Image (tube, coloured by chain):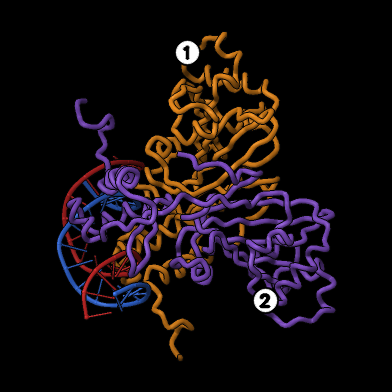
Chain colours: A purple, B orange, C red, D blue
Amino acid sequence: MGTTQLDTVPEPKYWHLKTVLSDALDSEFAVGEILPNERELAARFGVARATLRQALEQLELEGRLQRRRGVGTTVAPPRVGVAVGDRAHSWDDTDEAAWQPVDSAEAAPPAAIARLLDVRPGTPVHTVRRTRVSHGQPIAAELLYVPAASVPGLAALDIPPGAARARAVLGELRRVELEGREQSVELGSARADDAKRLDRLPGAPVLLVTTRYTAAGRTVAVAVATYRADTCRLTFGDGAGMVLAG
Amino acid sequence: MGTTQLDTVPEPKYWHLKTVLSDALDSEFAVGEILPNERELAARFGVARATLRQALEQLELEGRLQRRRGVGTTVAPPRVGVAVGDRAHSWDDTDEAAWQPVDSAEAAPPAAIARLLDVRPGTPVHTVRRTRVSHGQPIAAELLYVPAASVPGLAALDIPPGAARARAVLGELRRVELEGREQSVELGSARADDAKRLDRLPGAPVLLVTTRYTAAGRTVAVAVATYRADTCRLTFGDGAGMVLAG
DNA sequence: TAGTGGTCTAGACCACTCG
DNA sequence: GAGTGGTCTAGACCACTAC
């Protein structure tokens, strides 16, 4: 009783620091503005640099800050609303502006994907890599798995691996009459290759969106999309216009 | 060329460590098993404890590990698929088993919520707290905002704040003919109160699900649900049965 | 080359759980 | 009270960016 907090437990320094910084960001900084460097901030608040970094990491996780090695720490703009659950097919022509085909190959999917696709483990399937761009920035990297049975017309085309082949696979997929889709979202950390595509360091927090496309009771394709968690707000059912929640 | 890696860049220790531990988890440990403590693991791998912890943090973020102060680090079970985007209304009777009303009050919502609700900032609305439970564990804490106009019958009931009132508000909401819903998902960190409800430390990574319920073109209610990111996989459109992606 | 954030160390102490 | 994970320090060096 009578302490400065209702709780008796002492608040960790980095947590308190985060609150102070968060308030400062609201009142004293504009989007894009560069903060003082970590060593100076740490000195100013009288903490070790590691402690200061712990607070910055939290704020970056919440999308408030953006840190770039060799450059500095800047105030991040509000997260972009990204539609991932609208009714349109993900390989429709209308998505061409957002999704850029990168390349395509044939490979055996991971065991978990093989199970989703309902193919035997080790069976090679078509893979398509795409990158999603918004406001000039890459926001997602996707790997699409398509069993050969879903795109019977592809074999006749005989296209070598590459971007052209990626477009061909997507073109064949458009012929399929989709019945539905199931999606799931979970937290993950960026693999090295995805991180590079997303202009992030390996291990950066990402939102993993797994989509299963079905037609006539069968699984036509499975997509695993890796969205930057720091800059993206995924929207479902036309929620793209929603402003962010406090 | 000729180095141990294709990349010339040296891999950070904690990243390599994470890979090694991840493989060990797959092959040598069962779900629920307790790992050696951090000091011993660090010694065994010849790194500082802070470095070892960096690897463990990543694995916990990916839902592979569960750490509890005073207890130890255990191998986490696969993430639970949690339906958040099915067609059913979130306050249907069928959800009663999953969602437990906690309490209810009347308060002015944050500015961002007021905007979503289309009420003037500072206008008091009904708030309802609920907790979602799965397999005996709390997995989500929700705060529901309901403008008085959406539940005109409530005033006549005159129920004091508490769980009974929460049930009353939900009961009145069931009278409303819902038209649709918009949802968004983003990464956040748990506030102190939510963290306590979710049996986590403040700042733990969470998935923030904001839902706007509409009827006749108007916003009936807005819900902000805080899901544990370490244990939950959010599913949309009947994807609850999907197994997790590699 | 100077300055930034990213990684790493070797310690210390604290808060918590449990026997 | 013993043992665990959580916080914190004061340094060091590295990788990257930009001038």
Q: Secondary structure at mark 2?
A: helix
Provide the residue designation for mark 2: A163
Any part of residue A228 in sight = yes
In front here: A211 or A85?
Answer: A85
Residue A81 percent location from the top left of the image: 55, 50
Q: At 26% across and 58% down in the image, what residue appears?
A: A36
Q: What's under tag 1, amino acid-wise?
A: Pro
The reply, left or right, for residue B243 in relation to residue A206 is: right
Residue B43 percent location from the top left of the image: 30, 67
Provide the residue designation for mark 1: B160
Mark carried by residue A17: none
The reply, left or right, for residue A131 in relation to residue B200 is: right
Quadrant in the picture for the N terminus of chain B: bottom left
Q: At 24% across and 39% down in the image, what residue appears?
A: A10
Instruction: For marks 2 and 1, give the CA distance.
Output: 64 Å
Residue A130 percent location from the top left of the image: 63, 67
Q: Residue furthest bottom?
A: B2
Residue A198 percent location from the top left of the image: 51, 66
